[in-house]
Image: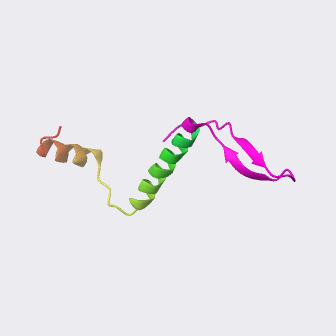
Amino acid sequence: MSTALKLKPQFVTDELGKKTAVILPIAEYSELLEDLSDLAIIAERREEPIMSHKVFTAELKSDGLL
């Protein structure tokens, strides 16, 4: 997730001055999409069991991945 993204939006307004849309630079839009994806994954995994770092590294070692 990005840290302290400083957005620089531009707004599209109607004839009454009401904001109707936002224009963002592609890089900012891409970062927002990535952050939303990360948050969705976190939400999906909220109920998964957790394991300690010690157990996790032990499993990686026993699988030959560390």
Q: Residue at x 29, y 53 (%)?
A: 51
Q: Tell whether position 4 is magenta.
A: yes
Measuring from the top left, give residue 57's x and y in whole percent.
22, 43
In this rendered view, identify the residue nearer to me: 44 or 27.
27
Q: Which residues are magenta?
A: 1-27
Q: How is the image coloured?
A: rainbow
Image-quadrant location for residue 32? top right
Measuring from the top left, give residue 58's x and y in whole percent.
18, 45
Q: Is residue 53 among the parts visible in the rendering?
A: yes
* Side of 13 where 51 appears, left or right: left
Q: Count numbered badges in the picture.
A: 0
In this rendered view, identify the residue nearer to me: 28 or 55.
28
Q: Tell whether position 62 is magenta.
A: no
Q: Is residue 4 among the parts visible in the rendering?
A: no
Q: Quadrant of the C terminus?
A: top left
In this rendered view, identify the residue nearer to me: 15 or 24.
15
Q: Residue furthest bottom?
A: 47
Q: Residue furthest front?
A: 15
Q: Residue at x 82, y 53 (%)?
A: 18
Q: Is residue 53 above or below residue 41?
A: above
